[in-house]
Image: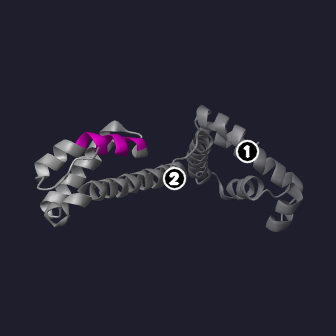
Amino acid sequence: MIESEQLLTPEELFTRYYARLCEFACRVVDCEETAEDLVQDVFVSLLENNQLARVSPGSARHYLYGMVKHAALNSVRRRNIAARIFKKYTPAETEEREITHHMMQAEILGELHAALRTLPKGCADVCKLAYFEGKKNHEIAAALGVSINTIKSQKQRAINLLKRRISPQALTLLVFLLH
């Protein structure tokens, strides 16, 4: 049996409906603490805006349930949106590995470029064309106007010089990355 709501103060409405509204909200948002916060926020909002005084005594229960329902549904929507955003912008484990791999490549290639700048011009040009542009020996020879044997010897000389200028760890990773 529903009791008459005539002449109930906001405190009496809170006392009468708080637990019921919390139970209702909890079933919607599936979190007891969130449900309690929502119900409290609804009452605070209604009190601050003096809206309870404007609600007819017979419809206060429906009004309170409606307010809590909207607050709970908005909470669920915000939580779902946040979850989608988090999922969309949180890299998966494979993406994390790819990012780490790209960082390693950038560091190794940076070290390689620094070492290439210390090589004689001919050796550096041959290395750049062979290893960065993927050109074959005969293509490099034609582009530079030298013999294929010169290209082979320049590549060998460059590799020997680079071995001395690049750290062993970077050289190991470079071999791994280039193959």
- Viewer-side residue, 73 vs 58: 58
Q: How far apart are the two marked residues, 1 and 2, measured between alpha carbons?
A: 38 Å
Is the residue 19 above or below the residue 126 in the image? above
Q: Which mark is residue 75?
A: none
Magenta stretch secondary structure, dominant: helix
Residue at 34% across, 37% down: 32
The region drawn magenta spans: 18-27
Categorize mark 1 by other alpha carbons within 10 Å: few (<14), some (14-19), many (20+): few
Image check: 97 left or right of 157? Answer: left
Dot placed on the residue nearer the N-terminal end, 1 or 2 = 2
Image check: 47 left or right of 30? Answer: left
Q: Amino acid at mark 1?
A: Leu
Q: Residue furthest front?
A: 1
Image check: 150 left or right of 78? Answer: right
Residue at 20% across, 64% down: 55
Residue at 57% across, 46% down: 99
Question: Quarter holding the N terminus?
Answer: top left
The image quarter containing residue 94 is top right
- Viewer-side residue, 54 vs 80: 54
Q: Magenta segment: does it hold 146?
A: no
Q: Which residue is mark 2?
A: 84
Q: Amino acid at mark 2?
A: Arg
Q: Which residue is mark 1?
A: 178
